[in-house]
């Protein structure tokens, strides 16, 4: 398995007011929630309903969140265990971690 992130296949929406990245798959809302404190984004929760699990949605959400953090100069605190595991599998994002 490559440690480099692949190109996402979904157009994830960044709802800045709600501090959330989201995607709706077959009518199910999938999210990556974060809390922004200055330039530190704490990624707190990745939620993908079981009905649409196993499709790479969580990975796409996290990749989009991390790419946004990089573009905006944010550091990332991976509170969510899925985000922490994703970064371990994709070390290209390790430099964003605090």
Image (cartoon, rainbow, N blue to C red):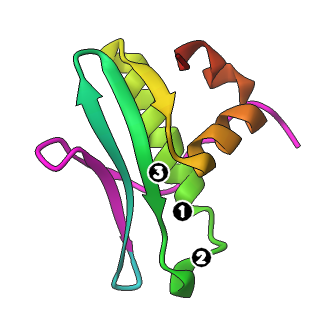
Residue beneath the point at 36% across and 63% down: 23
Q: Residue furthest left?
A: 17
> Would you name the residue on which mark 3 appears?
61
Q: Are marks 1 and 2 in contact (CB under 8 Å)?
A: yes
Q: Quadrant of residue 26?
A: bottom left
> Is residue 7 depicted above or below 58 in this figure?
above
Residue 92: image x %, image y %? 68, 21
Q: Secondary structure at mark 1?
A: helix
> Would you name the residue on which mark 2 appears?
53
Q: Which residues are magenta?
A: 1-24
Q: CA distance from mark 3 to mark 2?
A: 13 Å
Q: Secondary structure at mark 2?
A: loop
Earlier in the chain: of badge 3 and badge 2, it is 2
Residue beneath the point at 28% across and 49% down: 20
Q: Badge 2: how crowded within 10 Å, few (<14), some, or many (20+)? A: few
Which image quadrant: the N terminus? top right
> Would you name the residue on which mark 1 appears?
57
Q: CA distance from mark 3 to mark 1?
A: 6 Å
């Amino acid at each position: 398995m490559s440690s480099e992130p692949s190109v996402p296949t979904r157009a994830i929406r960044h709802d800045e007011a709600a501090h959330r990245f989201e995607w709706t798959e077959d009518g199910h809302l999938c999210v990556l929630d974060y809390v922004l404190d200055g330039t530190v984004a704490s990624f707190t929760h990745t939620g993908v309903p079981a009905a649409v699990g196993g499709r790479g949605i969580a990975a796409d959400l996290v990749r989009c969140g991390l790419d946004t953090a990089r573009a905006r100069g944010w550091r990332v605190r991976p509170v969510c265990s899925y985000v922490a595991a994703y970064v371990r599998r994709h070390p290209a994002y390790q430099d964003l971690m605090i």
